[in-house]
Amino acid sequence: MSIKLLLELFITFFKIGIFTFGGGYAMIPLITEEVITKGWLTSEQLMDFIAISESTPGPFAINIATFIGYNQQGVLGSILTTFGVVLPSFIIILIIAKAFHKFASNKYVVGFLSGVKPVIVGIIFSVAVGFILKSIFNISVLELSEIDFKWSTLLIFACVFTMTRIWKKIHPIFIILVSGMMGLIIYGLIL
């Protein structure tokens, strides 16, 4: 167990927690940059962690931080990364709750939040494009490689997309289960 790595995990996820606006999806580019460039995970492993984090109960940010911390330094690593990603939000919420009435009508705060909203949409869109490129064409956003088109992933995407267009009120858990079963059948039994 490396004290230096434990401290680096905490600081990295604390930084991710501070500089991420817009929730879990908006933090994926920052997590990707930090985790892959530090060599903690490959892009394939990160994609798997993102899928698992999204599929398990609880907030995405906590799930992914916990999984990465555990992967690197076991239980202590998972505790420190989870604490690191949650602590900035906790501190900011305490400050905002204490002085909400001053912040709510402040023109600078309102202007800042109005400017951040479109950026969050852009970041989430960027994550979606990155997933599509990696899943269907096997092109990593950070490391360009040969295009390796994956018909099977496109088939799963098309089926799930069609399902959500036909049945508008389909529950997300059902979509996750159907996607998982299709992946199991295609990648586990057929390919």
Image (tube, helix red, strand yellow):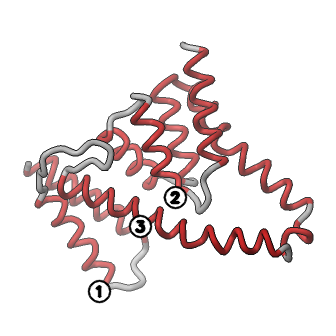
Q: Is residue 41 left or right of residue 162?
A: right
Crowd tier of the residue under label 3, counting other residues whose Cα lies within 10 Å: few below 14, some 14–19, many 20 or above: some
Q: Residue at x 54, y 56 (%)?
A: 24
Q: Of helix, strand and loop, which one carries label 2? A: helix
Between 77 and 139, the residue placed more toward the observer is 139
Residue 166 badge: 1
Residue 86 location (% of width, % of height): 68, 45
Mark 3 lies on residue: 125
Q: Which mark is residue 138?
A: none
Counting residues from the N terminus, which is met first, the one under dot 1 or under dot 3? 3
**On-image quarter of the N terminus:** top right
Distance, label 3 to label 2, CA atoms, is 9 Å
Query: In the displayed structure, would residue 74 be above or below residue 191?
Result: above
- Residue drawn at (40%, 43%) of the image: 49
93 lies left or right of 130: right
Image x and y of residue 13, in percent: 59, 38
First in residue order: circle 2 vs circle 1: 2
Q: Secondary structure at mark 1?
A: helix
The residue where tag 2 is placed is 26
In x, y percent, where is residue 132?
27, 61
Q: Are marks 1 and 3 in contact (CB under 8 Å)?
A: no
- Label 2 and label 1: CA atoms lie apart by 28 Å
Q: In x, y percent, where is residue 27?
A: 52, 52
Task: Using residue 28 as the reference point, say whether residue 115 is left or right of it.
Answer: right
At x 85%, y 77%, the residue is 105
Kindly identify the amino acid type of the residue bearing the numbered disc 2: Ala
Which amino acid type corresponds to the residue marked 1 in the rendered image? Ile
